[in-house]
Image (cartoon, rainbow, N blue to C red):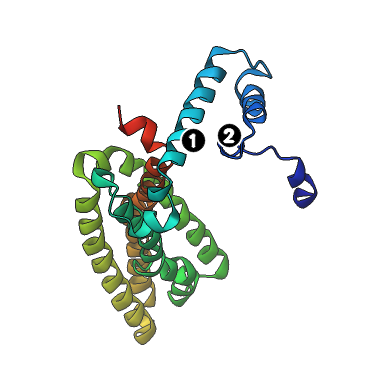
Amino acid sequence: MLFCLLPFLPESPRYLMSAGRPEESLEVLAHVRAEGDSSNSAVLEEYHEIEQSVQQAKTQASTSSFMALIWGSTSGKLHFPRRTQLALWLPLFTQVGTGIAATTIYTPTLIRQAGWGAEKALWLSALNNTVGVLGTVIAMYTIDPVGRRPTLLWGSLAQSACMWIIGAMSVLTASRPSQATQYGSATVAFIFVFTLIYSSTFLIINFNCTSSAISPYADCICSRTD
């Protein structure tokens, strides 16, 4: 159904403007912003902003290509290449380097090693994923006052400590069956702590850095030259 409906999906106003179809760009904006009223002041204001942005981008095409975005050195204080590299590598490191994939995948296995049933293992795994929501709420109040780099640094150290403890507890759970419940409980507790730290540091900064790396490139000309 999605495939069949895609041809009827309107293009974005910015693309239509850059493709030399300004009337269609205005029409789409009018439908989105003002129920089809193309004379609406908010629609016209956004239309002219997009028009100015596209014109500026065309005049600076040499610094607006994908290669210039990655390797260019003419972006000045906007640091497009650095922003792009952060946007490319931070998500990869977040998924592969932090250990969140391992805890997410193997949480049910670690819980079952502690002697708990499959139902409880799945229930606790779902609860662990829900803890991530709390972490994002914490990040709302900590990232701006603390800063992204300090948050990533302490998040790395804290996640590393949790991962070492989880590994040690899981080994003890398997090697000492008589105390599997105690060690298993510690394992699960630190998995929860790990998830909370991850979601309040790397997860939210990953999305934040990715969006802040790309979005200024799209409309920086209008917003940064004033």
Residue 137, percent across and down? 36, 41
Judge from the rendering whether residue 79 lies leftward or rightward of residue 65; answer left or right. Answer: left
Q: Which residue is mark 1?
A: 54
Task: Give above or below for 163 relative to 59.
Answer: below
Q: Residue furthest bottom?
A: 175
| Residues under numbered marks 1 and 2 in contact, where contact means CB atoms less than 8 Å apart | yes
First in sequence: mark 1 vs mark 2: 2
Residue depicted at 60% across the width and 37% down the height = 12
**Is the residue marked by circle 1 packed among few (<14), some (14-19), or many (20+) residues within 10 Å?**
many
The residue shown at (65%, 28%) is: 28
Q: Is residue 81 left or right of residue 34?
A: left
Relative horizontal placement of residue 167, taking residue 125 as reference (left or right): left
Q: x and y percent of residue 38 in the render?
A: 64, 17
- What is the x, y in percent for residue 29? 61, 26
| Amino acid carrying mark 1 in the image | Val
The residue labelled by disc 2 is 17
